[in-house]
Amino acid sequence: MNSNSPIVRFGCSVIRKSESLSFFSSVIGLIYCLLIPNPLFNEETYTSESALLPGLVDEQLDDSGEIYQMIHEAQKASKTSAGTLSWAVERFRSFGLDVYSHHFTVKAEYIGGSGNRTGVTVCATLRTRRGASTESILLGASPESPTAVGLLVAFAKSFSKRNYWAKDVVFLLPQLSHVGMLAWLDAYYLGKVEQFSYDEIAVRSGRIEAALMVNIDRVEPYSHVDIVYHMLNGQLPNLDLINLLVKLIRKHNLRPTIFNQEQRKDYYSSLRTAYYGILEQAAGEPNGLHSVCGRFGIQAVTLRPYYSRTARDFRDSAEALLSLGRVIEGSLRSLNNLQEILHQSFFFYVLPVPDHYISIGMYMPVVLCFAFTLLFKVAAIWVSLNSANSEENLGPAEAEQPAWLSSLKSGAHLLFIPPAVGCLLLCLPKLLVGRVDDVPNFVFLCFLASHLLLHFLGSKIPDQWREDDFFKIYHMIVLVEYALLICACSLLNFGLGLIYCLLVVPVVTRLNPSNGQPIHLTGRVLCLMLIHPIYLYILMQIGRWQAEPTDMKEIILRAISSYMLLDNWSFAILMIMLSLWINAALLIRM
């Protein structure tokens, strides 16, 4: 291409100003990140799947006394030796449902305990009278709550009298929360996982298209219904499911909330709710029975009704309970209309309020701005490196291989050893199963010991590399690795990618060798500790109200156990972050 062409001149100009462009790119990304939660910059939700017909059916649940009776019987049964599950099995059978108990065992080596954990999942299936049982919808609750069990039994009694069900309705009561849910789903879909041993499914329905979980501890004059929608590894349900629930909750004079945040059409409220959503997605931890449904392609949420004193309208408990029941009935009947799985709306979004969303096309530019910050910094380092080399007066015949290139060949191990250690730590938990009694604690000790690698590799850096500007090439490679990491994370888990952009990018772009000066080294070490993978992960857990600052070891052990038991990505991402962090830490040792 002609060197005088506009494209070449523009490219050269961009490269020359890459240092300034790197700074402005990060500033633009930060400003844009703060702007998109503004109601002026996000869109109102809408239902893409017309077959749902939200709010058009007349709910037939009209007897709160019957619901109260079932809840009272469940609470009474919970105090007996037989327990709530036995009572629920008898009740389900009396309504003509296909009922069975699914026994499962969680192996001790996957949970770091002294013995296996056992549990039972009660499943009751209401067969459709209008189809061939090829599709189903699921309604679940925790058997630890007699109120929730009584509510599900009341639904089963009411639904068994209706003949409009085109899909099977599956009522599920799994013990051990999401662990029992995962064991049942794995058996239902004929999976074979090493973490569990369980019975075969005695009664099977068709494909589960959607699932609603009810989290209710006691009966009170509910004013709000909180929609818990984040799933394992940052997965999100189809936005149509949330839109459906929001409309039905409002139809029955309740208020939909997300993270218990009152809906206000102001900037700070939207920013706070979006912040909680990003933290929850970034953590990727299970937060309810619905959490493990995403890995099986099931769109699922949990409904958690509660009473707030901010509600101005007063209602008694019976009316509120009936309204909640009608919300659930209306949701299941809308899902009953589906002719195909939910797919027409978004799977990637951020919700600042229940009825507004930020789509992937709006929030991804934030990540791109921070990725360009790193790439512009790479270009700036390359310009400075070439400027230094151009000062040498070498003729064409006398030109030799650049000094930094020979240093790069001799120092290639610095780039490959940290990722190799990260891969080893990632594979270690499942390799040690059956060989070590307490795998999570052993892996945690290996994780801490891996930091000795930083001291060992740092002591092997020769002084000649500083003179050869090898650190500039090393810095460029580290920045490119971080750019690839945040882009990959953002596609899989936007919340994690965004947090990484905001906290890590400003630090790694300012990393420079300490040149042996203790003051410079101390300052850079402190900055580097702020982006340590453990520190970032603990901050996310504290930010989502799941931990105290003193629970540091427990948080990491939980991440290891969750990785082994649930295939949670948190520990895997920690290991990738650790290998890059060691590479960045070596930079300041030069």
Image (spheres, helix red, strand yellow):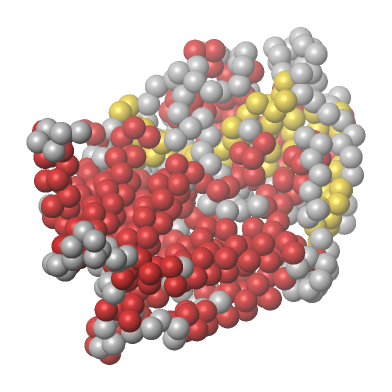
The answer to whether residue 512 is seen in the rendering is yes
Q: Is residue 285 above or below residue 163?
A: below
Where does the C terminus fall, quadrant-wise?
A: bottom left
Percent x, y of residue 136: 72, 24
Q: From the viewer's perspective, is 582 left or right of 60? A: left
Which residue corresponds to the image point at 11% horizontal and 46% vertical from the top-left?
A: 13
Where does the N terminus fall, quadrant-wise?
A: top left
Percent x, y of residue 495: 41, 49
Relative to the observer, which residue lies in front, 304 or 7? 7
Percent x, y of residue 123: 80, 37
Q: From the viewer's perspective, is 251 left or right of 208? A: left
Q: Which residue is at the far top?
A: 130
Q: Is residue 389 above or below residue 284?
A: below
Percent x, y of residue 328: 59, 29
Q: From the viewer's perspective, is 31 left or right of 37? A: left
- Residue 100 position by quadrant: top right
The answer to whether residue 273 is seen in the rendering is no
- Residue 209 position by quadrant: top right
Relative to the observer, which residue lies in front, 529 or 103? 529
Q: Is residue 574 above or below residue 333?
A: below
Which residue corresponds to the image point at 28% horizontal and 33% vertical from the top-left?
A: 42
Which residue corresponds to the image point at 12% horizontal and 33% vertical from the top-left?
A: 5
